[in-house]
Amino acid sequence: MDDTEAKWQSWLSGLAPSKRAAAESLRTQFEALGATDAPDGARSEIDENQPQLARFVLLRSLWRGAIDGWAGPGALEQVAAARRLLDAGADRDDLELMARAVAYEAVFATVDELDCGADVNVSGVDAGWVVVESGKDGSPTGRRLSGLHEDLLTMDPSGREGADLWR
């Protein structure tokens, strides 16, 4: 048993049976989704009452769809300007890289703005917003998904934390 697993087992042994079952279920879900730090995510969700699974699913989904979707077959051809550039001899890999980098920047700006929404003093208007986890039935749990911009790079499914976007 490695050190991480030993710490996990030690922590689990100190939990009430219902929390232990919830922690084990969370770890299994994180692992099934490909999280490299599944025990940490589960522990944070249980100990700190942070919606880590919802954060993971949202940020990973943004990577796979909005960012990495540009590397999919036919994605560039859906944009007339990209089609013209390809027809003119532009390098497909460079165009995909540019599209993914621009998409990353747009996603980052969006989640950063969502993160700032609860601070009504930023806008000077008495209105704001928050991103909240929902339960299986779609109703809000009340647990906020905050600091999304802080973890966007770590959710790169390639494990490279976006390093290839700026090459």
Image (tube, rainbow, N blue to C red):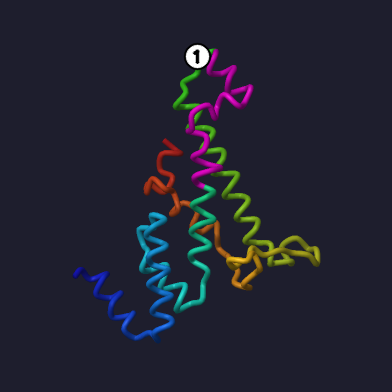
What is the quadrant of the N terminus in the image?
Answer: bottom left
Query: Seen from this angle, which residue lies furthest right?
Result: 126
Check the image and report above or below for 38 versus 15: above
In the image, residue 84 lies in the stretch drawn in magenta: yes
**Residue 48 or residue 105, whichever sits in front:** 48
In the image, residue 93 lies in the stretch drawn in magenta: no
Query: Seen from this angle, which residue lies furthest top?
Result: 88
Query: Seen from this angle, which residue lies furthest front?
Result: 137
Q: Main secondary structure of the magenta part?
A: helix
Number of numbered tags placed on the structure image: 1
Place of residue 8 in the rendered image (x, y in percent of width and height, measured from the top left): 30, 74
Q: Which residue is mark 1?
A: 89
Q: Is residue 78 left or right of residue 17?
A: right
**Residue 136 or residue 161, whichever sits in front:** 136
What is the quadrant of the C terminus in the image?
Answer: top left
Place of residue 67 in the rendered image (x, y in percent of width and height, measured from the top left): 52, 41
The residue drawn where x is 56% and y is 38% is: 102
Check the image and report above or below for 105 versus 44: above
Place of residue 137 in the rendered image (x, y in percent of width and height, measured from the top left): 62, 66
Check the image and report above or below for 25 versus 10: above
The residue drawn where x is 56% and y is 40% is: 103
Query: Label 1 sits on what residue type?
Result: Gly
Q: Secondary structure at mark 1?
A: loop
**Residue 47 or residue 126, whichever sits in front:** 47
The residue drawn where x is 45% and y is 38% is: 166
The residue drawn where x is 40% and y is 86% is: 16
Place of residue 24 in the rendered image (x, y in percent of width and height, measured from the top left): 37, 72
Q: Which residues are magenta?
A: 63-87
Mark 1 is surrounded, within 10 Å at the Cα level, by few (under 14), some (14 to 19) or many (20 or more) other residues, namely: few
